[in-house]
Each structure stands twice: as structure tokens, then as C-alpha cells.
Image (tube, rainbow, N blue to C red):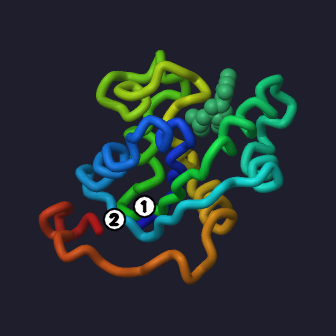
């Protein structure tokens, strides 16, 4: 099983979509391994978005990510990193396919509802960035045989 990081962005909190977005991941069959509300600092956002530091929108996205607290989640499942990226959809909400989270809830490239880790390496780094070890819980859902074939997990 893989674990991946999802951040419910300030736009999601401001628009009252927390429950709806969390339901998407639950309905898919992912297991919630960690969740907390936190107010992101410029320092942690500079680290998180370091790959974009040369972009003209670098400060703009950091500002948008700190207008209010966010909710950081750790979701677990087989191929969870890929599955969650697929559920999130394309970065720009206007291009994201209907049926994806961004496709259904976002009209913007910046206000695009969720952040989701994009690779196993990134997921490991990002989970460490936003969670302490004792904030991630290792437990098994009791519905695994209804979610997967017995050789899938
Ligand atoms: P990126 O890591 O490229 O996309 P994703 O979130 O799909 O992994 O970009 C990080 C965030 O930066 C993105 O969610 C929204 C913001 N962003 C912009 O505001 N404008 C842009 O042109 C891009 C590419 C990203």
C-alpha cells in the first residue's frame, strides 16, 4: 500500500467544500491515515513550492495558500499516489476533465481545490514535511476484501 499527501487548499475551506472533497477520496476506497488543520507559513510554502521558485506566480501561490488554514491529509491505498492524482485532475480547473475534483469544482489554475503528491519520492518527502511520525496512523480498514481482490493488496 502507498501513502500520499493531499492538501485541501484555502479555496476549499473558504467555499465550504471540505466534506465534499474528503468524501471523494473516501468513496473511492482510500483509507485516511492522517488529517490535521494547519496554517502554512511562507517558510514551509517556499520549501513545498521550491520547484516553482523561478515562476512569476511563485509569491502569488504562496500568498493564496496562506490566506487561511488548510487541511492536510494522508490517504492510503494500492497505487494511492497515482489514484489520487487521477482523482484531482489537471492543474488548471478549466482544463480538468469533468468527473475529476478540479474538473467538477474549479475554474482556476491557482484556486484548484487540492494539492496531491506527484510521485512516490515526492509523497515521502511531502508527508514528512507536513506530518510528524506520530500523526500518521497505521491501521487496516476492515473492508479490504470488498475493495480489492485478495492478491491486489
Ligand atoms: P504544479 O506543481 O505545476 O501543479 P499540480 O498542483 O497539479 O501538481 O503547480 C503547483 C501549484 O501552482 C498549482 O496547483 C497551482 C499553482 N500554479 C499556478 O498558479 N499557475 C500555473 O501556471 C501553474 C503551472 C501552477
Q: Residue at x 50, y 75 (%)?
A: 136
In what quadrant of the picture does the N terminus appear?
bottom left
* Ligand 1 quarter of the rendering: top right
Q: Which residue is drawn at 79% across and 32% down?
A: 58
Q: Is mark 2 on a helix, strand or loop?
A: strand
The image quadrant where one finds the C terminus is bottom left
Residue topped by disc 2: 31
Which picture quadrant has residue 75?
bottom left
Crowding around mark 2 (Cα neighbors within 10 Å: few <14, some 14 to 19, many 20+) is many
- Residue 21 percent location from the top left of the image: 36, 44
Label whose residue precedes the other's in the sequence (2 or 1) = 2
Distance in Å between CA atoms under marks 2 and 1: 6 Å
- Asked whether the residues under the numbered discs 2 and 1 touch, taking CB atoms below 8 Å apart as contact, a structural biologist would say yes
Residue 32: x, y in percent? Answer: 38, 65
Q: What residue is shown with label 1? A: 75
In this view of the protein, which residue sits in the foreground, 108 or 70?
A: 70
Residue at 29% over, 50% down: 23
Q: Position of residue 27 (x, y in %)?
A: 23, 51
Q: Where is residue 64 in the image (x, y as percent from the top left)?
A: 67, 35
Q: Could you say whether the residue bearing mark 1 is in a helix, strand or loop?
A: strand
Picture quadrant where residue 146 is located: bottom left
Amino acid at each position: 500500500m502507498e501513502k500520499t499527501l493531499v492538501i485541501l487548499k484555502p479555496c476549499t475551506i473558504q467555499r465550504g467544500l471540505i466534506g465534499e472533497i474528503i468524501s471523494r477520496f473516501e468513496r473511492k476506497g482510500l483509507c485516511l491515515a492522517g488529517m490535521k488543520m494547519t496554517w502554512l507559513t511562507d517558510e514551509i510554502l517556499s520549501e513545498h513550492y521550491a520547484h516553482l521558485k523561478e515562476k512569476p506566480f511563485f509569491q502569488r501561490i504562496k500568498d493564496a495558500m496562506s490566506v487561511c488554514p488548510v487541511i492536510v491529509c494522508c490517504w492510503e491505498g494500492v497505487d494511492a499516489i497515482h489514484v489520487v492524482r487521477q482523482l484531482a485532475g489537471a492543474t488548471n480547473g478549466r482544463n480538468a476533465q469533468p468527473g475529476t475534483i478540479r474538473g467538477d469544482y474549479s475554474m482556476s489554475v491557482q484556486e484548484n481545490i487540492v494539492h496531491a503528491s506527484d510521485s512516490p519520492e515526492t509523497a515521502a518527502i511531502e508527508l514528512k514535511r507536513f506530518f510528524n511520525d506520530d500523526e500518521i496512523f497505521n491501521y487496516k480498514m476492515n473492508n479490504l476484501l470488498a475493495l480489492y481482490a485478495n492478491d491486489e493488496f
